[in-house]
Image (cartoon, grey):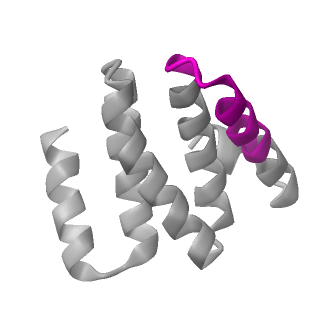
Amino acid sequence: LRHYERALAVAERAGGRGPLADVLTSVGRTHYDLKQYVRALPYLARSQRICEQDSLLDQLGANSLALGQTQQALGQRGPAEANLRRALALARQIDDAEAVLLR
């Protein structure tokens, strides 16, 4: 987690929004893996906003999957289902399920 937080600081300074979104999703996933679901949400939400604004579809799909899983773990069934469906739809849209679902 410390390495991701350092990478996050570097990505923010560098200004590249794609790499920043990737690192934010990775930090969120790490918190998810540690069962720190509430801590994961702000990272995943910020990544999702960046992906939406910049039309980063494969990253948006991977982020939507991680966000949906986190919301599901928190019992937020409606938002979780919406994000999980979005991840699946994006995987189909870009015709690369591996890029979205296995990222």
Q: Which residues are magenta?
A: 72-87
**Residue at left offset 56%, top offset 66%:** 51
Q: Quadrant of residue 14?
A: bottom left
**Residue at left offset 71%, top offset 30%:** 78
61 relative position to 30: left or right = right
Number of callouts: 0
Residue 72, above or below 43: above
65 relative position to 11: left or right = right
Q: Position of residue 71 (x, y in %)?
A: 55, 29
Asked whether 4 or 72 is in front, the reply is 72
Residue 80, above or below 64: above
Q: Position of residue 12 (x, y in %)?
A: 25, 72
Q: Quadrant of residue 31?
A: top left
Asked whether 32 or 10 is in front, the reply is 32
Q: Position of residue 91 (x, y in %)?
A: 78, 49
**Residue at left offset 67%, top offset 47%:** 100
Asked whether 94 or 88 is in front, the reply is 88
Q: Position of residue 24 (x, y in %)?
A: 36, 54
Residue 34, above or below 43: above
Check the picture and name the quadrant holding the C terminus.
top right
101 relative position to 25: left or right = right
- Magenta: main secondary structure: helix
**Residue at left offset 37%, top offset 49%:** 43
Specify whether residue 81 is painted magenta: yes
16 relative position to 89: left or right = left
Q: Residue furthest bottom?
A: 15
Check the picture and name the quadrant holding the N terminus.
top left
